[in-house]
Image (cartoon, rainbow, N blue to C red):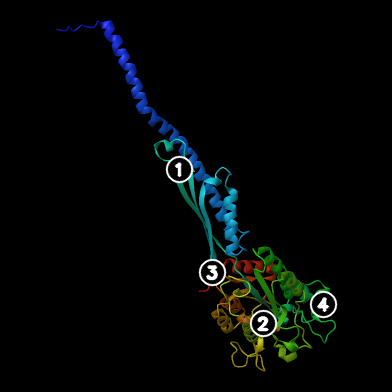
Amino acid sequence: MSKIRALSPHRLRRSFSRNERGGVAVLFALVALPMVVVCGGTLDYIGIEEVRGRCDAAADAAALAAAGRSAIALTAAAAQTQAAGVFTADLPDKIKPVITASQATVTDVGTTRTVTVTYTASVPTTFLRLIGIPTVTLTGSAAAAASLPIYMDFYLLLDNTPSMGVAATTSDIAKMVAATPDQCAFACHDLSDSDDYYALAKRIGVTTRIDVVRTATQQLMDTATATAAVTNQFRMAIYTFGASATAESLTTISALTSNLAAAKTAAAGIDLMTVPYQNYDGDMDTDFDGTLTALNTVIPNPGSGASASVTPQKVLLFVSDGVADAYYPSTCSQGLAGGGRCQEPLNIATCTTIKNRGIKIAVLYTTYLALPTNSWYMTWISPFNAQIAARMKSCASPGLYFEVSPSGGISDAMNALFKSAVQGAWLTR
């Protein structure tokens, strides 16, 4: 029969201590792997997020590269190639090997460009592979959109008829009145008189409306050149009512051209219509109806503005003091001055016809300043002066009307009209 030996308290503590050390070792072995995975997984996560951030940044840069100002002149295919190149170039060398797929897609529809850049990356892990996760797959994308340049053709119709020989400002009017025996503010370009009032105005330094329009037109060419985002975005054509009253008709100063420097040079030739002698043809030299109708036949149908050669949008920019003076014996809205002579505010019927074709009309009304010392003005123009601005505004497309006195800055107003037309580019469906 065996005996059970009781352990002393000291021996019992030594035995328990040996058992405790063994238990700690086992416990540590059980928790060490999860701790390594957790701590190491955090490091893997930091590395994965760094890759994601670099890839996202490269995708953003690539999308913007295809939609930015410098790229909008490129074709969609060329912009797509550029975007793909930017994505690769923007990635650090250490990240490039983990990219398993990337794609840039550029689509131009009408006047809008959309860009999408996508990528897939397979990022190797260090610690997560201990639990069977050797790689982590990342996917990402970036998108951008931009308005493509709108190609626009501008047709300038500049009133150069005798009324545009009126002194441009109130001070110029006073100077002309003081310098002429009949107190006339009109600088008529009368070829029968070697010292006509037009020559007088130039000699005494009076600026006339036509002088201001000429300068403004030249400055507009500079504005269009500076505004263009791409080559040939804007083309210009310049017309007047004719060089002489003997051949009054739509007259080309510059045919439609993308060479705006050449158009500017041609604009220097804009001058007041000459008359062979006083009261020639009853002074009926401002045929709005006939001239606008003729220009309507010159302007082709407008397009969406997506290309320069086939589908440019069309804008008629009309600069005038707004008073017709022509042979309209049966349609005149005012009393006839005799012989069928009609002086009236603009008849907007032809404007409506032009706008119905999808052509925008921008109107710059150079205020018809009152001439209280001129008996003809007081008899025939003054009674309807208050209607002139309203008719000119009715001719214009919404948002494309300016009224300005010559002293108020015709150049600034013409530039503002141009910019309004460009900013308000429209889509045709």
Residue at image coords 62%, 93%: 329
Q: Name the residue nearer the viewer: 117 or 182.
A: 117
Who comes first in sequence, dot 1 or dot 4? 1
Who comes first in sequence, dot 2 or dot 4? 4
Residue at image coords 18%, 7%: 4
In this view, the mark in front (2 or 4): 4
Who comes first in sequence, dot 1 or dot 3? 3
Residues at marks 1 and 4 touching, judged by CB atoms closer than 8 Å = no
- In space, the residues marked 2 and 3 are separated at their CA atoms by 53 Å
Q: Quadrant of residue 363?
A: bottom right
- In space, the residues marked 1 and 3 are separated at their CA atoms by 43 Å
Residue type for callout 3: Gly
The image shows a total of numbered marks equal to 4
Q: Name the residue nearer the viewer: 349 or 68.
A: 68
Residue type for callout 4: Leu
Question: In this figure, which residue is indicated by the disc labeled 2?
Answer: 378
Q: Name the residue nearer the viewer: 395 or 370.
A: 395
Q: Which mark is residue 110?
A: 3
Other-residue count near label 2 (Cα within 10 Å), few / some / many at <14 / 14–19 / ≥20: some
Residue 169 is at least partly visible in this image: no
Circle 3: element type = loop
Residue 146 located left or right of residue 292: left
Q: Which mark is residue 200?
A: 4
In this view, the mark in front (4 or 3): 3
Residue type for callout 1: Thr
Other-residue count near label 3 (Cα within 10 Å), few / some / many at <14 / 14–19 / ≥20: some
Circle 1: element type = strand
Residues at marks 2 and 1 touching, judged by CB atoms closer than 8 Å = no
What is the residue that sits farthest to the front in this orientation?
Answer: 1
Residue 235 located left or right of residue 63: right
Question: In this figure, which residue is indicated by the disc labeled 1?
Answer: 135
What is the residue that sits farthest to the left in this orientation?
Answer: 1
